[in-house]
Image: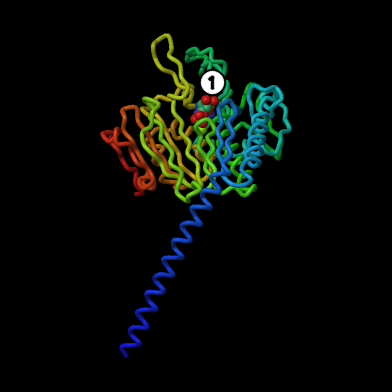
Amino acid sequence: MRNWKTNRTVRIYILIAALCMAVICFCVMNQKHSENINQNKATKEFFAMDTYITMNAYGINAEDALMQAADRLSALEQLWSVTDSESDIYAINHGSGQPVSVSEETAKLLSFALQMAEDTDGALEPTIYPVLTAWGFTTEENRVPSDVELTELLGDVGYERVRLEDNAVQLDSDMMLDLGAVGKGYAGDLAVEILRENGITSALLDIGGNIQTVGTKTDGSPWKLGLRDPFTGGTLGTLEISDGAVVTSGNYERYFIGEDGKRYGHIIDPATGYPVENGLASVTIIAKEGRLCDALSTSLFVMGLDEAADYWLQHQNFEMIVITENGEIYLTDGIAEIFTLDSNHSSMKVNVIEHE
Ligand code: AMP
Ligand code: MG
């Protein structure tokens, strides 16, 4: 009996020792794998879509994958630029009321933008361009248009009047499209798609502040992203993300100070033609797809806090962080676990928007 017990104890010790060895081997292999992947880090920095782009990817194919993704982004810029006379958007805007045939990518982007415009009740307004131009945001010769001018220009704004059939787009002759509020997010998704097709499982793309991630860091931990402080340009806190996108909109990004001393931002309320002024400093959206983040960061910024919270309650396919001009933070409840406020901002009031 004693012998049997002793044998059993010995077997248990052997089993524990074997398990420990296996765990140690696994950790060493994992570390080696992570080191190998880290050695295969590739970086690409360039300017496209009117913004600075930095892409980091890891893996044996990383260099080539990034090259393909960069080529894709540059090609999309050529299709979607408002000012390039060779672009699809330029052709649509100069179609003099006639149908214009565009590439499949442009038709898909426009279809997404129109769907989001409808879903946000016109807070996202892909035809706001004539109003933006009046404010000088397209030329950097900023001015404050008169009420009469804005009312007249708003007559040429209305996503419902954009006709998209297959790959043909038709606008009324004075209407103009600008897909700047969704294009970078949509293009980011296409770049991510290319990286995945090339077998990349770890990558971080920064497309003018739009962050898109593939997988996790090479050690398996989530990407740590800084949330920008809209007041100082520093960091407010840290977000931990894997396989998702984070996009922020705010009127601090591009604005001018008028002769009246007032600050006018680049996100326009399509209901009034004036830059949004609703007490919000920034809206950050976190979701799987960059296109959704981009469309919603702009449109929920237009909606304001209460409507944005209602929209979140009704949709639930994203999370958000809203910062108000008086320095309060509103988080949807799914984000509380992945967001940490920096200790030097711990005095900021944090409110959680909860499911009902
Ligand atoms: P984002 O940086 O993604 O928030 O997009 C802002 C850009 O979208 C602006 O610089 C304008 O070109 C354009 N824009 C401004 N207001 C709107 C709006 N209400 N709907 C759609 N696009 C807008
Ligand atoms: Mg946007």
Q: Residue at 49% across / 46% down in the picture?
A: 217
Q: Residue at 67% across / 30% down in the picture?
A: 79
Q: Secondary structure at mark 1?
A: helix
Residue 321 position (above or below residue 17): above
- Where residue 243 appears, as percent x and y from the top left, is 51, 47
Q: Nearer the viewer, residue 245 or 52?
A: 52
Q: Nearer the viewer, residue 214 or 120?
A: 214
Q: Is residue 12 left or right of residue 292?
A: left
Q: Is residue 194 left or right of residue 325?
A: right
Q: Is residue 354 left or right of residue 194?
A: left
- Where residue 200 appears, as percent x and y from the top left, is 59, 47
Residue 113 position (above or below residue 81): below
- Where residue 7 appears, as percent x and y from the top left, is 37, 83
Q: Name the residue that disc number 1 marks.
A: 132
Q: Please identify the quarter of the rendering in which residue 153 is found.
A: top right
**What kind of residue is marked 1?**
Leu
From the Cβ of disc 1, is ligand 1 less than 8 Å away? yes
Q: Residue at 50% across / 45% down in the picture?
A: 244
**Furthest-bottom residue in this view:** 1
Q: Nearer the viewer, residue 90 or 219?
A: 219
Please identify the quadrant where the N terminus is shown: bottom left
* Crowdedness near tag 1: few (<14), some (14–19) or many (≥20) residues, C-alpha within 10 Å: many
Q: Nearer the viewer, residue 289 or 134?
A: 289
Count of numbered circles in the view: 1
**Furthest-top residue in this view:** 259
